[in-house]
């Protein structure tokens, strides 16, 4: 898989939103179920907020722009293109990350368990 936008990825790491900072604190250093995640990971034409190469799982922290008609359409296209590459995308609203952290962690844990317990192709 081609990795573009490396410089943009580095800049995004420096300018994380509060929700991204909070979620990164939970995911970094294999703190969450001992799974390696990367942040602002460049893949093809996309930059994934958080990505586990081992699980092929992208976690996107979605702000308000993702809930407009245009944003939603772009997200659907992106999700389908990532699916073609075998990558599952989990979208979580910034508000939920900031206000419902325990529920977000439970959701991520369920998705990880489902991936780990599913048979390999």
Image (tube, grey):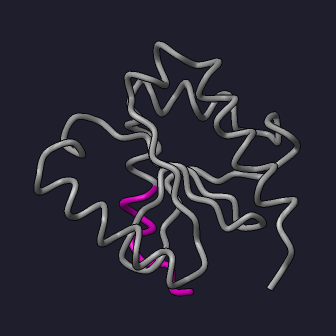
- Which of the 4 quarters of the picture holds residue 117? bottom right
Residue 100, percent across and down? 52, 16
Which residue is drawn at the image coordinates 46% and 54% (left, top)?
Answer: 10
* Residue 7 lies in the magenta-colored region: yes
> Seen from this angle, which residue lies furthest top?
99
The quarter of the rendered structure image containing the N terminus is: bottom right
Which residue is drawn at the image coordinates 30% and 60% (left, top)?
Answer: 75
Decide: is 80 above or below 98: below
Which residue is drawn at the image coordinates 42% and 62% (left, top)?
Answer: 47
Say left or right for 90 vs 44: right
Range covered by the magenta-colored residues: 1-9
Decide: is 73 above or below 83: above
Residue 80, percent across and down? 40, 75
Residue 23, percent across and down? 57, 31
Residue 109, percent across and down? 74, 39
The quarter of the rendered structure image containing the C terminus is: bottom right
Decide: is 118 above or below 110: below
Which residue is drawn at the image coordinates 63% and 60% (left, top)?
Answer: 57
Say left or right for 84 vs 54: left
- Which of the 4 quarters of the picture holds residue 58? bottom right
């Amino acid at each position: 898989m081609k990795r573009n936008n490396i410089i943009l990825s580095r800049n995004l790491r420096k300018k994380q939103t509060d929700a991204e900072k909070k979620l990164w604190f939970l995911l970094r250093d294999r703190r969450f179920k001992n799974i390696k995640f990367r942040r602002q990971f460049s893949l093809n034409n996309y930059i994934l907020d958080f990505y586990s190469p081992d699980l092929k799982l992208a976690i996107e922290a979605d702000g308000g722009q993702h809930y407009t008609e245009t944003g939603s359409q772009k997200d659907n296209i992106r999700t389908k293109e990532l699916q073609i590459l075998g990558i599952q995308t989990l979208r979580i609203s910034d508000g939920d990350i900031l206000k419902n952290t325990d529920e977000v962690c439970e959701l991520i844990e369920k998705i990880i368990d489902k991936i780990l317990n599913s048979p390999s192709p």
